[in-house]
Image: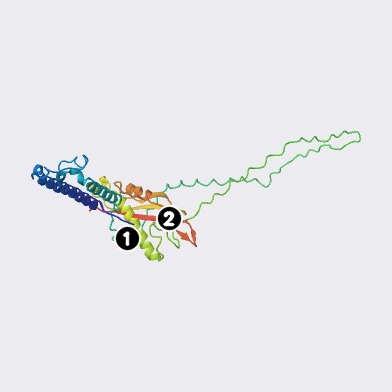
Amino acid sequence: MNFEVSGSTVFIAALAMIALTIAIVFIIRTVYNKRSSSNLTEKHAGTTFKSPLEGRNKYPEVDTFSLSGTLMNYGLLTAIALMILAFSWTQYEKVVDVSGLLSTLEEDIEVETPRTAEPPPPPPPPPPPVIQEVPNDVSIETTVVFKDQSIQEETMVEAPVKKETAPPPPPPPPPPDVKEDEIFKVVEDNPAFPGCEGISDKAEKKRCADEKMLQFIYSNIKYPAIARENGVEGMAVIKFVVEKDGSITSPEIARDIGAGCGAEALRVVQMMPKWEPGKQRGRAVRVQFNLPVKFKLE
């Protein structure tokens, strides 16, 4: 049985039980005071009891122990009712109206391209070689010296000595190619915030997931004090990757409006639970997601 009550209901029920208990005590006290004011001595002057136990209470009309069983049952019922209310006390999450913020997710987000250092200029080309002209009338004399390499019958020829050397070690195997999974920007089935798994229609499921995501963001986000004091408003953009298992990785600030707004949006994104991963051709893939977070003073 699903029995849920709010905090105000528990408080009102507790006050009602306390008031009822006080009223019961007041009524019983009034009744016994009225009975004790009557002349009980004359009424029970000739009363005899069969045993001392029956006569332990001199005046039965004002015997407070006669209601002990009833009052104990009332106490037990009150305790059980309070216990049921305490266990059924439900704190409801604050519902944030995000209907006016759904359009921000459909806008084209322009992300500034990070500036990179300019490469140094290429070195100047080497100077061309200098060609020295040689006049045609200059003669070049070369002297050829012939060496006698004839072998006689008595000439001893020694065979060359071969030196045995160890073969060189084999080269180390090349390192394996680390192929990082591709990060998609557009997929057939976009990643979705959890909470709408039972919806089959894609458009309705996307709208439900967007509402759940925005409610999570704007119920956890805290407007930075510096931005509030200086009236800073605008839209920060957080870029992150939804992995194959739905986890959020590589969150970073793609656009910041300053005054701590970008850091606060990044903090909330890092708190997100696992998403339903995006799919391409029926298999889960890594998908990049750009999330705009709007800061507006009220």
Q: Nearer the viewer, residue 189 or 20?
A: 20
Tag 2 secondary structure = strand
Q: Amino acid at mark 2?
A: Gln
Q: CA distance from mark 1 to mark 2?
A: 19 Å
Residue 168 vertical placement versus 252 (above, below): above
Q: Nearer the viewer, residue 89 or 282?
A: 89
Residue at mark 2: 288
Q: Residue at x 29, y 51 (%)?
A: 84
Q: Residue at x 32, y 48 (%)?
A: 264
Q: Residue at x 33, y 47 (%)?
A: 263
Crowd rating for badge 2 (residues with CA inside 10 Å; few <14, some 14–19, many 20+) = many
N-terminal of the pair, mark 1 or mark 2, is 1
On the image, the x and y values in percent for residue 294 come to: 30, 54
Q: Can I make out residue 108 in this image?
A: no
- The answer to whether residue 12 is left or right of residue 285 is left
Q: Nearer the viewer, residue 68 or 209?
A: 68
Residue at mark 1: 102
Q: Amino acid at mark 1?
A: Leu
Crowd rating for badge 1 (residues with CA inside 10 Å; few <14, some 14–19, many 20+) = few
On the image, the x and y values in percent for residue 286 come to: 46, 55
On the image, the x and y values in percent for residue 146 come to: 81, 38
